[in-house]
Structure formats: C-alpha cells, structure tokens
Amino acid sequence: MSSSPRAEPALPRVAVLGRGRVGHALAQALRAADVGVTGPRSARDFTDIVDLATNHDLLVLTVPDDAIPDVVAALAGRLSLSSATAVVHCSGAVSIEALAPLAALGAQTGSWHPLQAFPFVGTPLRPGITMAVTAAEPLRTLLLDLAERIAAVPMILADVDKPRYHAAAVLAANYSITLAALASRLLQEAGCADPVAAVTALQASNVEGLAAVGLPGALTGPLVRGDLGTIRRHLEALADTEADGVYRTLGLSTLSLVAERGGDPETIRAARTLLEGPSR
C-alpha cells in the first residue's frame, strides 16, 4: 500500500519592512520562489504597517540592529497581533528577546538571518548561502521551509549562540575586506598598478581552494612550508606599520592549522617565537 505524498505547507503572505540591502534581496528571492511578498516598505511608515500586519502572516524586519528596539516598540504600540501572526528580525547578533513586546501581544517571534555580504542595494541572495533560524515551533518549521524555497541552506541557531555566530561572520566577511585593504596598500607601495584587482584575484583563488579541499588543506604560504627566513623578511618590511600587528596576530592563529597539516613541532615553536617578537 503506497503512502500519500507529504502535503506541502501553505505559503505565508510575507511583508518585508525595511528598504535596505537585505530587505530588497529577501523580497526579490521570495518572489522568485513564488511566495507572496509585499515590500520592501519603510519600517517607519506605521500607518502602512498596521495595514500590512492585518493582511500578512509574516512580518520580516530588515532594519539595522540598533533600530530594532525602537521599531518594535512603535509596532507594539500600534498593532493588534495574534498567535497567527509571526514577526522576525534579520539580525545575526541581536537576541529574539528584542521582539518581546510583540510576543507579549501574542505574536510568534524569531530571527531569520542570511549569512551573506550585501555590499549594495540590488545585491541578490546567492544560492547555497546559510540562513540561520532562531524560533520556536511552529514558526521554526515555516522559516526552515522558506529558507529551502529560496535555495538557501537552513541552520537552526540557538539564541544564546548568536553573538558567536555573528562574530564568525564578521571575521570571514568584514575583516577579509580589511585584510584586502591592508594588502592593497602594500602592493601599491610596491608598485602594483591595480592592487585591488590583484588582491581580488588572489582572494578568489584562495576561496576556490577552500571550497575544493577544505580546512586545513587550503592553507598555503611560508608558515606551511616552514620558511622562517621569509617570515623574518616580512616582519622587517612591516616594522612600524599598521600591518605589523595584524600579520603577527594572524600568523600566531595560523599555527594551529599548520600543526593540523602535520607541520614540524620544532619549526612551529620557532615560528611562534618569531611572531611573538622580543617585546612579547
């Protein structure tokens, strides 16, 4: 006897509140997945928001982190919600407790964070990105399903783990741009005509290697080779520059990867001494 096919969950009516980069990207991705979407609309046009809340199942707040408490307070003072209404914010760092005033009115609350950089309005949501979901049932299942519909990889994220999760995102995304800026400056000083293009191509090859062989196999460079003479030359060239401390700190953090790659323990100890420097 064949079993009946699993029924597809009903698609919610979604309103995106917040007209920035994330709001535009999510609205575009949801529409492409045949989800009914209104917006993005301004999260401060409260007359419009009252109407949106009445006619939608899910309100998605895509406002800056520091604006969430004010927007939530204003919404709580104007809306009449129920347990059939869901409100999520798209912050990777802010607790869902920021939505407590709306939860007190009966709304289901949570967060739905796309783990992607959005450098400009119009940046599309990339297929295969991680979407972090922090919510109780039944909202959790709804957000997980929506993530899959927009070709993202859903991740259940505990509220207590959000700061650690978002710090990881900052290290991987924001600070890679900081490193690109430092490297571009050094290349320019060395005579490179287009340092940003040079760094972009180099970082792209690095990301391709990471995708192909993972960690720690994708690590390259003088520390992996045990080339301490090159490290010394780097440190001499960077002395008294902004890049010196960054180079030393990242080098020290890299030694654990070198050990995982089977690096010689004595060479690793010598590299640590070199990177720590005489004043450390």
Image: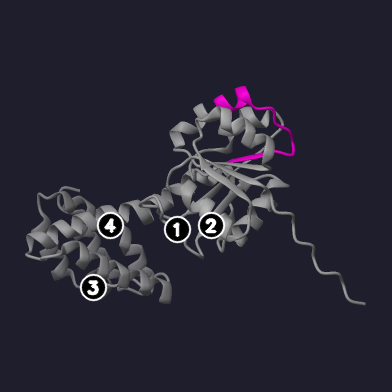
Residue with the mark numbered 2: 29
| Amino acid on which disc 3 is placed | Gly
Residue with the mark numbered 1: 124
SS type, badge 1: loop
Q: CA distance from mark 4 to mark 2?
A: 36 Å
Q: Which is nearer the N-term, disc 1 or disc 4?
A: 1
SS type, badge 2: helix
Query: Along the line of sight, which residue is nearer the eye, 95 or 84?
Result: 84
Residue plotted at (64% across, 30% down)? 102
> Residue 263 occupies which quadrant of the picture?
bottom left
Which disc is residue 250 wearing?
A: 4
Residue plotted at (15% across, 52% down)? 278
Number of numbered discs on residues: 4
Residue with the mark numbered 3: 226
| Amino acid on which disc 2 is placed | Ala
Residue 97 drawn at (x, y percent) = 58, 33
Q: Residues within 10 Å of mark 3 (few under 14, many from 20)?
A: some
Residue 151 drawn at (x, y percent) = 56, 64
Q: Which is nearer the N-term, disc 4 or disc 2?
A: 2
Q: CA distance from mark 2 to mark 3?
A: 46 Å
Residue 79 shown in magenta: yes
Residue plotted at (9% across, 49% down)? 240
Left or right, 188 with reference to 99: left
Residue 108 drawn at (x, y percent) = 68, 38
Q: Which is nearer the N-term, disc 2 or disc 3?
A: 2
Q: Are marks 1 and 2 in contact (CB under 8 Å)?
A: yes
| Amino acid on which disc 4 is placed | Leu
SS type, badge 4: helix
| Amino acid on which disc 1 is placed | Pro
Residue 23 shown in magenta: no
Residue at far right of view: 1
Left or right, 10 with reference to 248: right
